[in-house]
């Protein structure tokens, strides 16, 4: 499966594509401005131009890293879906659509025990990441998903 499969059916992919295009446009403009400053006569302009060129490098690195993370996460999700191993999304929700945290917290120990029983299983880490996300802990969810991705390789 590629990023572009089902692109116009998936709002998240459309958002990623839009943000990526905007970030690339921003990086091109910053490189152009940096180059203009680098070719100026004044020393201070040259220093500022060199500093401007650092921003697109960092931005490109972060963009590539996040796109790779998303692609790997999607690939793992497809494997688990084909195996029937994705966590079932049956948690109660508020009228606004948010998962009720107490319900997510109640199911969390099951996924944590699975990881403790099989610490080398990317599938267990993936499901733990979903449990963290449902409980509202995005930082730990990303960390667990990164761990799942490393074990998946």
Image: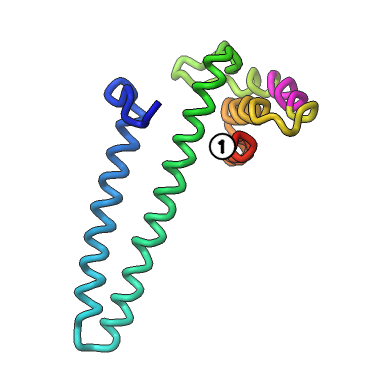
Q: Position of residue 78 (x, y in %)?
A: 49, 21
Q: Position of residue 44 (x, y in %)?
A: 29, 85
Q: Going by the image, does 107 lie left or right of 59? A: right
Vertical placement of 146 versus 33: above or below?
Answer: above
Residue 108 on the magenta segment:
yes
Vertical placement of 59 versus 150: above or below?
Answer: below
Secondary structure beneath dot 1 equals helix
Q: Nearer the viewer, residue 53 or 89?
A: 53
Residue 83 on the magenta segment:
no
**Which residue is outermost to the right?**
117
Around disc 1, counting alpha carbons within 10 Å, would you say few (fewer than 14), some (14 to 19), or many (20 or more)?
some
Q: Looking at the magenta stretch, what is its main secondary structure? A: helix
Q: Quadrant of residue 61?
A: bottom left
Residue 91 in sight from this viewpoint: no
- Residue at image position (22%, 60%) is 29
Bounds of the magenta span? 107-114
Q: Going by the image, does 60 lie left or right of 129? A: left
Total labels: the figure holds: 1
Q: Position of residue 97 (x, y in %)?
A: 46, 18
Q: Dividing the image into 4 quarters, which one contains the N terminus?
A: top left
Q: Quadrant of residue 8?
A: top left
Q: Dividing the image into 4 quarters, which one contains the C terminus?
A: top right
Q: Position of residue 30 (x, y in %)?
A: 26, 63
- Residue at image position (28%, 51%) is 24
Q: Going by the image, does 137 lie left or right of 98? A: right
- Residue at image position (59%, 26%) is 130
Q: Quadrant of residue 2?
A: top left
- Residue at image position (73%, 20%) is 110
Q: Going by the image, does 117 lie left or right of 143? A: right
Residue 79 in sight from this viewpoint: yes
Question: Which residue does the numbered mark 1 point to in the structure image?
Answer: 138
């Amino acid at each position: 499966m590629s990023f572009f499969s089902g692109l116009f059916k998936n709002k998240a992919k459309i958002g990623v594509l839009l943000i990526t295009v905007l970030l690339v446009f921003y990086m091109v403009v910053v490189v152009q401005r940096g180059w203009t400053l680098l070719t100026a006569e004044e020393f201070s302009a040259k220093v500022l131009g060199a500093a401007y060129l650092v921003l697109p490098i960092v931005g490109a690195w972060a963009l590539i890293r996040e796109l790779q993370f998303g692609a790997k996460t999607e690939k793992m999700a497809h494997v688990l879906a084909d195996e029937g191993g994705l966590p079932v999304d049956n948690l109660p929700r508020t009228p606004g659509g948010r998962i009720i945290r107490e319900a997510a917290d109640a199911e969390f120990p099951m996924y944590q025990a699975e990881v403790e029983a099989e610490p080398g299983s990317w599938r267990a880490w993936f499901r733990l990441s979903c449990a963290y996300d449902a409980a509202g802990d995005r930082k730990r969810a990303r960390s667990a998903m990164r761990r799942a991705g490393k074990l998946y390789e």
